[in-house]
Image (cartoon, rainbow, N blue to C red):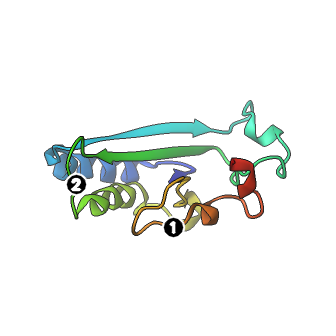
Amino acid sequence: MMTTELPRNAMQAVCDYWTGTARSVSRDWFIIIDMYGGKNGKIPSVASNAMSYAYRDKFLYMYELYDRVPSGSYPANGLSFLNGWADAFTKNLNESQWVRRPYITCRMEGMAQPANNHKPGHVYQLC
């Protein structure tokens, strides 16, 4: 998931989800936040037909949400926990401020196929 910004009310929603829900989850979960773009960014300097990276016209924050179980089965409510994080990050943003297109390489129930989440016609460059 990517956003172009995270205004104060969106950050508050993230903090509320952490304190109200996520702190009580005992599984191994974490979030990685990466930043892309800007005037010195490398991605915008590469031709758009040279790679599968679709979002090159904005400064972007990418949120990678992880939740795992070290042994046993993943719980039935696990995906709803991750979706809760995604909703916390995005519910106070308009559609132009975020992209919910995970760059996944495996198929999980309830998630789209990877081919639908990359720049059209460029998925072959991932191999």
Task: Identify which residue is drawn at 39% across, 57% down.
Answer: 86
Q: In the picture provided, is 109 more to the left or to the right than 67?
A: right
Crowding near the residue tagged with mark 1, few <14, some 14–19, many ≥20 C-alpha atoms within 10 Å: some
Q: Determine the secondary structure under disc 2.
A: loop
Q: Determine the secondary structure under disc 1.
A: loop
Q: In the picture provided, is 113 more to the left or to the right than 27?
A: right
Relative vertical location of residue 118 with respect to residue 70 in this rendering, above or below: below
Task: Identify which residue is drawn at 39% across, 67% down.
Answer: 109
Q: Position of residue 13 (x, y in %)?
A: 31, 54
Q: Can residue 100 be seen in this view?
A: yes
Task: Identify which residue is drawn at 55% across, 60% down.
Answer: 101
The amino acid type found where label 1 is placed reads Ala
Q: Where is residue 48 in the image (x, y as percent from the top left)?
A: 82, 50
Task: Identify which residue is drawn at 29% across, 63% down.
Answer: 80
Question: On residue 73, which mark appears?
Answer: 2
Question: On residue 112, which mark appears?
Answer: 1
Q: In the picture provided, is 106 more to the left or to the right than 85?
A: right
The amino acid type found where label 2 is placed reads Ser
Residue 40 position by quadrant: top right
